[in-house]
Every structure is written in C-alpha cells, then in structure tokens.
Image (spheres, helix red, strand yellow):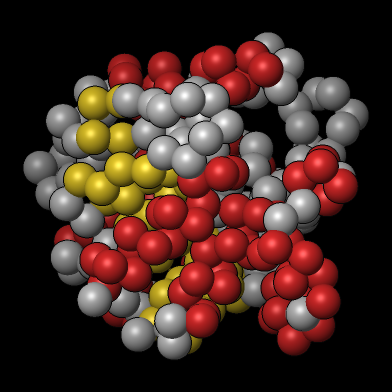
Amino acid sequence: MKVLIVLTSHSELGNTGHKTGFWVEEFAAPYYVLADAGAEVTLASPKGGQPPIDPKSELPEFQTEATTRFKRDEALQQKLAATLKLNEADASDYDAVFYPGGHGPMWDLHNDPSSIALIETFYRQHKPVAFVCHAPAALLKVKDQDGAPMVKGKEVTGFSNTEEEAVQLTNVVPFLLEDELKKLGGIYSKGQDWHSYALKDGLLITGQNPGSSEAVARILMETLA
C-alpha cells in the first residue's frame, strides 16, 4: 500500500509579515496512522525539499503524542527535508493521496496545476483522496470528469468560518474555505469548533480542523482496506 502526502511550500501569512506553512499535527498524526498500518509513505510539495512548518504549530499548547513522536524521529525529519517535487509525482504509483493543512495550502496548493491534475487523476483512477483543515482549499479548482467542480453535491468539511474568526485571520486569508466550498455546490457541514469532525463521501475524505487529522487518516486506511 503506497500513499502520497502532499504538503504546502508556501511560508508567508498574507501581508502580515508572519510565517505560515503546514500544521505539524496535521502531518504527524496521519503519517504515523498510515506508516504504523504498514503503508509506504512518500512526501511531496510544489517546490520539493523542506516544506515550511507553521511556527504556531510548534507552540507548547498544540503538542500531541504524534508531534512529540515526530520531534524525536530523526529519520522522518530527514525524509521531510527532502520531499519530492510535486510535478514529479505520478498518481499511478500510489493507492491514495493525503493533504495536511495549515494556512499555506490556501495560497499555493489552491492554484497549483500539478496538484489539481494529480487530484483529478487519483479520482479518475478510483483512488481515495483525503484532506484536513485548510487543505480542502486544494479542491477548489479540481473538476470531475464532466467538468463540474469535484465537490459539487458532495458532503465536505474544512476549517470553518468561526474557527478562522477565532484565530483572527478572517481578513488575512485569501478566501474563507467554508464559503468557497459552499459556493461550488459542496454540501458543507461542520462539527463543534476544534473538535474532531471528518466526512467520507465516496472516495473523498475531508476533516474540519487539526483535531480531525487522525480521524481522516483512519477513514483513509479503512477505505484502502
């Protein structure tokens, strides 16, 4: 079983002068769920090499068992420092794809032609595609075989407007993910803010926030099984 994890290469938080990237928990928790179940995991990002880590995700209050394990895992840190360039990834080589969030994907993966084509190919090949938190931003320009938005008529979730408001970035992000998913005809729903909430609609799996990352990975594993 081979799974591709796609991370952001974007590090600037709009015009704030602050940094962003991927959220550690949203990478670490799913990675260990997949790897511990015997999956062979490949890491990729638009620019290749080391993807930027959102510095906020390294603050003490956001640490979990998975992030603690990641900090001690030198082999995984080295693997992360050498991600494959996204345009070199071939969907045919993998059984599924997983996208961790953090605010970064709202700027790069949302528009990345290689990412869009990759998701469309996975879906055409009847392989599961999974996204957590802000990562469903990568779905916004993805089309189905009929040329309609892939999320149209599908049950989806992602970082909610109320959560974006809580982190005071409503006016910093390029768009509000919840609004965009709804505009495209996605059947958006959410759970309680900051609590685990994950949905599966056919081969499309989405999670609302960092707390949902492990649940999304477990649903992905069940789908592959």
Rendered-image quadrant of the N terminus:
bottom left
Total numbered labels: 0
Instruction: Left or right? Give the position of 144 relative to 42.
Output: left
Decide which of 123, 38 is in the foreground and name it: 38
Residue 31 versus residue 98 in the image, above or below: below
Position of residue 79 relative to residue 212, above or below, is below
Residue 114 sits in quarter? bottom left
Q: Looking at the picture, how far across and down is residue 91, in whole percent?
A: 34, 72
Q: Position of residue 72 (x, y in %)?
A: 82, 76
Q: Residue at x 49, y 46 (%)?
A: 212
| In-image side of 92 versus 74 (left or right) | left
**Closer to the camera, 57 or 126?**
57
Residue drawn 32% across the image and 50% down it = 205
Q: Residue at x 28, y 68 (%)?
A: 222
Residue 21 against residue 185 in the figure, above or below = below
Query: Is residue 61 visible to the viewer in this orientation of the structure?
Result: yes
Taking the image as shown, residue 103 lies to the left or right of residue 160, namely: right
Q: Quadrant of residue 2?
A: bottom left
| Residue 12 screen position, x and y as percent | 78, 38
Q: Nearer the viewer, residue 116 or 29?
A: 29
The relative height of residue 39 versus residue 117 in the rendered view (above or below) is: below
From the image, which quarter does the C terminus lie in?
Answer: bottom left
Residue 41 appears left or right of 201: right
Residue 114 visible in the current orientation: no
Residue 70 on image: x %, y %: 74, 70
Residue sitting at x 61%, y 21%:
164
